[in-house]
Image (cartoon, rainbow, N blue to C red):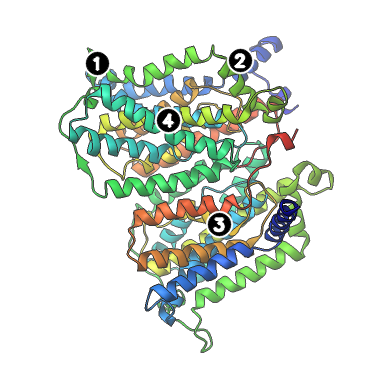
Amino acid sequence: MASQSLTLPFVGAAWRDRILDGLRDNTYVFALVLTVALIIANTAVLPAFASWSQVPSELGTLAPFALAAMASTPAILSGGGGIDLSIAPLMGLVNIILVTGLLSHGLGNPAIAVPLLLLLGGVIGAVNGVLVGILRYPPVIATLAVYFVLGGIDLRLAPDPVSTNPNWTNQLASTLWHVPGTIFTVGVVLLLWFFFRRTAYYGALFAVGDDDVAAFASGVNASVVRIVAYTLGGVLAAVAGIALTGTIQSADVTVWPFYVLIALAAVALGGTALTGGRGGFLGPALGATCVYLIQNLLSALGIDVFYVQVAFGAVLLVAVVGGAFLGRTAQRPRGAG
Amino acid sequence: MTSVSANRAVLAAQDLQRRFPLLQLVALVALFVWGIVGLPAFATRPSIDSMLVLASFLGIAAVGQTIVILIGGIDLSIPNVITAGNLLTTLLGGKHWSFGEIVAAILGGAVVVGAANGFLAHHFRVPALIITLGSGSVVVGAVLAGTHASVYGSVPGWFTHFVSPASTVAGLHIPQVVLLWIVITLVVGVVMHLTGIGRRLYATGANERAAELSLVKTELVWVGAFAASAVFAATAGILLGAWSGTGEQAIGDPYLFLTIAAVIVGGTSLIGARGDYWRTVLGSLILIVLTTNLVGHSYSEATQQIILGLIILAAVGTYGRDRALRDRV
């Protein structure tokens, strides 16, 4: 009702409805517009920002943000208050095992290391999935417990930072075969997402996320759908951990806590509803890009680092409140948290 | 037949646990006994006093988390409000503001922040998780920028004594801050269980639509609950200012997940409207006694975290799991 009173100047009612519908259906539009504006602003402040020599390393720094946000997404899409707080400590675990366990013991060959780490991520994701999908723990609690366990394991394995010798992960944060290495992390994940959208599982995921009881009553095995969603998140967290290793070139237990809340913020900023059943991977990736670009812009302007926090929080509030305002006609009851 | 009677016993036990935090009491006593048996100085006065003081900080910080979880929300801005309260206490103290002015300024600011959290989350139907994440970032960033992250400052001597485990109340060997916690617990308990405010709170958490139809102003409940949450977090921040003596940029950070852990270990369910603050008091005590035991046996912080994670799973496994989908059709 309230949104009907919203008037846009210079456009007729039909166009206004079409624009509002477009914004509602493509929840990532706000993040996309913000991303473009921020890229322009960054380039205006620091022309070197857009130079070819800079872009690969900038994308390398962005990659763990974007992947952490994307890894958080399947759990959220699966609904029922779905959330995965354990993504960041899992990234840390993958980072630490890759540096201290694999690279330093001659197992660093990507053909061995990557499948092993993805498997590890998948297994831990599946544990979350079983806790939520079968044992019916509230997702916040299940993944918080796993967060503590993984955080503890991380701290045990690498109490002090361990740096690594030059290795292949560095190329992921610079260039690989003459193109930015991020294409092989974020790019591949986004590409797979577009194929994923054609699978039957995609439909089931959104059905369960939108209304789990209705999906269950229609014969969808909601437990399995949720287990797969958390497993997927775990696998993506492993990719994020590998990308993280690429940019920091060390095993450092103090880095992952930074991604815990930023990942959730990026998902929300990208327009994915935290109540489940709405959104995709493009939004979180764009949301993460916004977070990174805001940070970059303010530090290029020489603004106090604390204002970055203020700006980030303010943009997040504007984005979610604005998104909620647009989505009002599609109002549904609130989920937990 | 035996399986039927066993089943009945399980149901009776579950029913009892719902009404009364039996498991939590048993766990607390067991942890305490473990401490007495395993650690020589565990049951001495200084040791018990410090545990109580640490539990007070956690317990006071978790009052708000309990209330907002009861209405189906969550407050991630608690650590930021604690840090802001902590920095402002020492900074303004160093600028010779009177103690009353400092407390009034900080708690006033907290009310504004908390009320905004509750209003935005309720009015725009945005998950409280995201709203409080954003507002917390704004608050702590603004305070750090405004104070230039200065950690210099001071607090009055009596106030440092107030949070000292060695302090006494009218000759009794109770640290003064613990007395404050007891008073807060009593007041919160009375408000939640014996007043209309408490009934509106539980009604909102149990079924918001039904509450609204019963003329409960649920938006006001949300605004009030989040405002209370920020006020108690700020109070914890002020107290931690006295404890640390200086401002610390990251002093609130552990309280993000510790307050949630205290609430759920205590037995308040994230599903809403099930639980109360007494349980969080038990949860806070359990976490502190457990940590003291683990530190005493020189377990590393890493092991402590792992054990905390497993305990959360074990505790919540016995209650507070969601209903099966087939029972909700």
Residue found at the very far left of the displayed protein: A165
Q: Residue at x 31, y 28 (%)?
A: A243
Q: Nearer the viewer, mark 1 or mark 3?
A: 3
Q: Between residue B197 and residue B265, name the one nearer to us.
A: B265
Q: Are marks 3 and 2 on the same chain?
A: no
As shown in the figure, which amino acid type bears the numbered disc 1?
Trp
Residue A22: give its label: 2
From the top left corner, tell me how far across and down residue B155 is, in percent: 40, 71
For residue A52, the mark is 1
**Kind of residue indicated by mark 4:** Gly
To the question of a shared chain for discs 1 and 4, the answer is yes
Is the C terminus of chain B in the top left, top right, bottom left or bottom right quadrant? top right
Left or right, residue A84 beside residue A299: right
Q: Are marks 1 and 3 in contact (CB under 8 Å)?
A: no
Mark 2 secondary-structure assignment: helix
In space, the residues marked 2 and 1 are separated at their CA atoms by 34 Å
- Look at label 3 and name its amino acid: Val
Q: Which residue is mark 4?
A: A122
CB atoms of marks 4 and 3 within 8 Å: no
Whether residue B93 is visible, yes or no, is: no
Q: Are marks 4 and 2 on the same chain?
A: yes
Q: Nearer the viewer, mark 4 or mark 3?
A: 4
Q: Chain of mark 1?
A: A
Do residues under tags 3 and 2 come within 8 Å of each other at their CB atoms?
no
| Circle 3 or circle 2, nearest the eye | 3
In the rendered image, the vertical position of residue B111 relative to residue A127, given as above or below: below
